[in-house]
Amino acid sequence: MRTLNLTWMGRLLAMRAVVLGLCTAVMLVVRVADAQMPLPAAKPPDGATLFKQQCAVCHTLSSSEPMRQGPPLVKVVGRPAGKVEGFRYSENLAKADFAWDETKLDAWLTNPQAVIPGVVMVYRQAKPETRAAIIAFLKEQN
């Protein structure tokens, strides 16, 4: 009778060891697979978010809101530069003779002083994809 109990106990311990070994092997396979799978790419912020983060401190999107440091940017695409009534522009920007389009806005957001020397806007955006997202958002506001 004792032999049967030891055999039964031995078999139980052996099966436990096999099950634990299989579980450990499965966990290792899962960990290796997880380590090899690339993480999903972070979604870049959209134009509205970028505008709020980088532009809304100085600009509004409504002509009914009080003006801030910069003029409102509602319907800026196609609008003559330096011509929002009630906003006091720097002398050179007030004399500008162009309308805002995607190309001018891209150059402006890259370096405003290179477009019109003497302007007071200090914001610069080096990333083309960020500028493009902001400009696309501004176009939607037209």
Image (tube, rainbow, N blue to C red):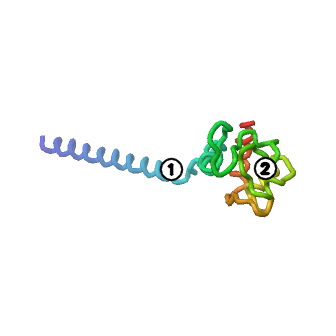
Which percent across, then down, holds residue 98?
Answer: 86, 49
- Decide which of 26, 39 is in the foreground and name it: 39
Q: Which residue corresponds to mark 1?
A: 34
* Disc 2 + disc 1, Cβ < 8 Å: no
Identify the image quadrant of the C terminus. Answer: top right
- C-alpha gap between disc 2 and disc 1: 55 Å
Q: Amino acid at mark 1?
A: Asp
- Looking at the image, which residue is at 12% across and 40% down? 1
Mark identifier at residue 82? 2
Which percent across, then down, holds residue 20?
Answer: 33, 48
In-image side of 80 versus 38 (left or right): right
Secondary structure of the residue carrying numbered label 1: helix
- Looking at the image, which residue is at 74% across and 53% down? 89
Q: Amino acid at mark 2?
A: Gly
Query: Which is more N-terminal, label 1 or label 2?
Result: 1
Within 10 Å of disc 1 (Cα), the crowding (few <14, some 14-19, many 20+) is few
Which percent across, then down, holds residue 3?
Answer: 16, 44
